[in-house]
Image (cartoon, helix red, strand yellow):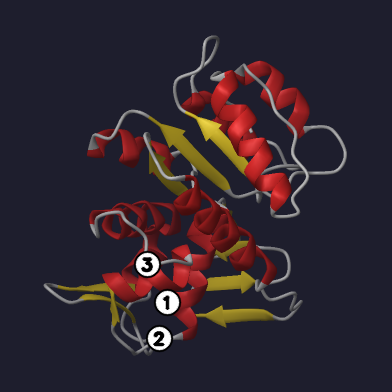
Amino acid sequence: MIEDERDLIAALEYNLEREGYQTRSALTGRAGLELAEQEPVPDAVLLDLMLPDISGIEVCRQLRASKRTQQVPVLMLTAKGEEIDRVVGFEVGADDYVVKPFSVRELMLRVKALLRRQQREEADDKEVAFGRLRLDSGGHRAWVDDREAVLTALEFRLLTTLLLRRGRVQTRERLLQDVWGIEADVTTRTVDTHVKRLRQKLGGAGEYIETLRGVGYRFRESAAGTEA
């Protein structure tokens, strides 16, 4: 946990440890980054957006830039609830977002959902190829025309979900439930933001993801006709 409110840290530590989790806490962004580099690698990071030294956005950027922590799910805690703040948080790699004040019960459910989602990731070393796109499920890596596309853990889950269900329409609500792991209290614009960013990172292969207005998204059933 990286949070500058001591009372909140104490409350979260108590509730998380009561659920059987081990916790480490820091009151500043830099101290939190140092904690994240210690053994063992954290299973999840609860990160406040407003910190006294560096912003939670910058902390999240650095967590995603480190090979050690780039796949660790990040749950942002913040008093800022404007949509633009959520979008920026998701763009730098946050997996979920809770606006203060929040109920401890809701936070516990979101933490459990994040960890459950990590646990059910397939540890399959087989690669999946589709047109210009190649995925390594076990290594959480993706390539377009043999050039690696650097994806966050959530972006990789979104891409894998769409690819494995190619040809079938996925509503935004279904993606929120299956990719984010809970019936999240966030707008469906969250899905749109992630799909837009995913397409940008995939370059020409982004065309494989089709938008169905008023419905959701669909991964093309065939790569034919989309090759450059």
Q: Amino acid at mark 1?
A: Leu
User: Is 143 displayed left or right of 103 in the figure?
Assistant: right
Q: Are marks 1 and 2 in contact (CB under 8 Å)?
A: yes
Secondary structure beneath dot 3 equals: loop
Residue 124 pos. (x, y %): 74, 79
Circle 3: is it few (<14), some (14-19), or many (20+) Cα within 10 Å?
A: some
Residue 126 pos. (x, y %): 72, 81
Residue 227 visible within the image: yes
Comparing 49 with 109, the one in front is 109
Q: Amino acid at mark 2?
A: Arg
Vertical arrangement, residue 5 with respect to residue 81, above or below: above
- Which corner quadrant of the image does residue 136 belong to? bottom right
The answer to which of marks 2 and 3 sits earlier in the sequence is 2
Q: CA distance from mark 1 to mark 2?
A: 6 Å
In the image, which disc is placed on residue 115?
Answer: none
Q: Which residue is labeled 1 in the image?
A: 162
Residue at (12%, 72%) from the top-left corner?
213
Residue at (49%, 19%) from the top-left corner?
55
Residue at (36%, 55%) from the top-left corner?
194
Q: Amino acid at mark 3?
A: Glu
Q: Which residue is labeled 3 in the image?
A: 183
Residue 195 pos. (x, y %): 34, 60
